[in-house]
Amino acid sequence: MEKNKKIAVLGGGSWATAIAKILLTNVPSINWYMRRQEQIDDFIKFSKNPSYLTATKFDVTRINFTSDINEVVKNSDILILAIPSPFIKLHLKKLRRKINKKIVVSAIKGMVPDENLVVSEYLHIKYDMPLENIAILSGPCHAEEVAFERLSYLTIGCIDRQKAKELSNYIETSYVKTAISDDIYGLEYSSVLKNIFAIAAGICHGLKYGDNFHAVLIANASQEMAHFCQALSPIHRDINESAYLGDLLVTSYSKFSRNRQFGNMIGKGYSVKTAQLEMEMIAEGYYGTDCIHKLNEKYKVNMPICNAVYNILYQHESPTLEIKKLAEQLA
């Protein structure tokens, strides 16, 4: 893979903005697709994303903005998808150009609603993408800390490890360290699950459970994650690596975690709808909870934490009673 390939970011949120900042450390220019032209206009005017990571300044002369997804696909060799999972189908439906000859990197930590597929599966099935041309960007990395240039770690997953290594050249910076993996499904499913577990952690915090219980919850969550990933993709993986356990920990504990924040509101008595309205960003774990529940009807993995979150969010069970029942099952 040549270093001078044209690279694009698709998405206008905080994670897309953080990825753009990383890329511009390594390449002279990027293409950047955002849905709303007014967001682009304000970005160019103020040299920053008007809605996310607003303290981060950009040299906009190095960015080729467009609100036309087909234009960005036409002019790019590598596409990094950083669109929230609930909206990915909406954006990709606009495509009139084939993407199966491109390198597509999913930075989406969620599943495609209604399809119950992780993004790599969706691209492979719906867009005839060869799996070796699909990569996953994962790991314990909050956009806000990237904006502050705090040391962070990311894993690039691809079944073609050479492609993963070459993609890491675009991502590695003085403040972002990279690792490579060929476990694309494990990386994706663990990314979905850690959001659900972070909602559980937030609910427990809202209910005033303490650090002792929180530690037991996350220890059990890591086992739940390991069992589910192994059922769906039975290969050797070390769930204690940072791409899995590290991502689970940071999402469950960090003040920047929108899924923990969403769960905290539920634990304090907010309805799901009210919590969603008050959130400034999408809590992807809400959608992932339903997808994983439906998927697990086939695999039947024992997942008491995921089941408890599903019962609270979708069956409208009492958070107090559901977490009390969950506590009796944990060890």
Image: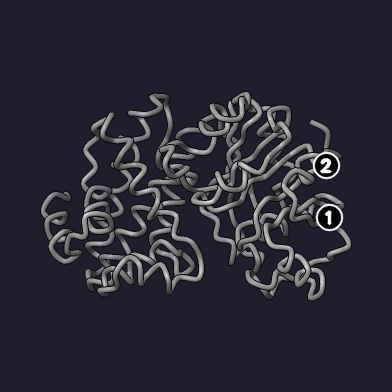
Q: Which residue is mark 2?
A: 75
In the picture, residue 228 is in which quadrant?
top left
Residue at position x 42%, y 35% in the image: 238
CB atoms of marks 1 and 2 within 8 Å: yes
Residue at position x 12%, y 62% in the image: 321
Mark 1 → mark 2, Cα distance in angstroms: 10 Å
Residue at position x 71%, y 71% in the image: 56
Q: Is residue 105 left or right of residue 261?
A: right
Q: Amino acid at mark 1?
A: Asn
Give x and y (percent) for residue 264.
33, 69
Q: Is residue 320 left or right of residue 305?
A: left
In the picture, residue 213 is in which quadrant?
bottom left
Residue at position x 46%, y 42% in the image: 241
Sequence-first disc among 1 and 2: 1
Give x and y (percent) for residue 305.
25, 50
* Label disc, if present, on residue 103 of the rendered structure: none
Q: Which residue is mark 1?
A: 64
Q: Amino acid at mark 2?
A: Asn
Secondary structure under tag 1 reads strand
Q: Across the whole image, how many numbered discs are drawn on residues?
A: 2
In the image, residue 24 above or below residue 45: above
In the image, residue 233 above or below residue 110: above
Circle 2 packing at 10 Å, graded few (<14), some (14-19), many (20+), is: few
Viewer-side residue, 293 vs 148: 293
